[in-house]
Amino acid sequence: MTINLVFIDASGQRREISSQEGRSLMEAATLSGVPGIDADCGGACACATCQVYVDPDWLSRLPAMSDGEANMLGFAANRQENSRLACQIRLAPELDGLTVTTPEFQF
């Protein structure tokens, strides 16, 4: 199934992409050339360079944050209440339309 996603960068530019169910949000972004998702560790939850701010309307639809993700976000610059690591969000049908913003420092 194709999942539609919206990325908004720190300047407000909106990018709509589509990706396949089962990929991570980070993979979808990097494969589509979305700026602001550096993914230095390649998705191993070891760097926090794929931090995104999840639109509040979507937070309850995401899977629970693992302890590893929470610990890694502890090192992330400008962490917010709605921060998540894109490498830890697996695309599923209930996330069709997911909207996230990339932090300014990753722009």
Image (spheres, rainbow, N blue to C red):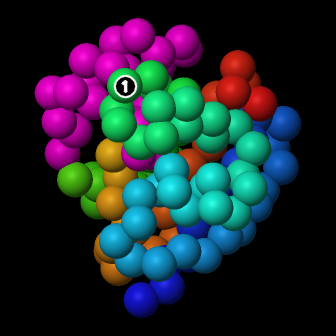
Q: Residues within 10 Å of mark 1 (few under 14, many from 20)?
A: some
| 5 with respect to 106 (left or right) | left
Q: Amino acid at mark 1?
A: Ala
| 80 with respect to 71 (left or right) | right
Q: With respect to residue 95, does 74 lie above or below?
A: above
- Is residue 76 in sight in this rendering? yes
Q: Which residues are magenta?
A: 64-87
> Does the magenta-highlighted stretch encompass residue 3?
no
The quarter of the rendered structure image containing the C terminus is top right
For the point 81% across and 43% down, the residue is: 12
For the point 41% across and 42% down, the residue is: 43
Residue 98 in the image: x percent, y percent? Answer: 49, 63
Q: With respect to residue 25, does 51 lie above or below?
A: above
Q: Nearer the viewer, residue 15 or 58?
A: 15
| Residue linked to disc 1 | 46
Check the image and name the residue furthest to the bottom: 1
- Is residue 59 in sight in this rendering? no
Residue 40 in the image: x percent, y percent? Answer: 55, 30
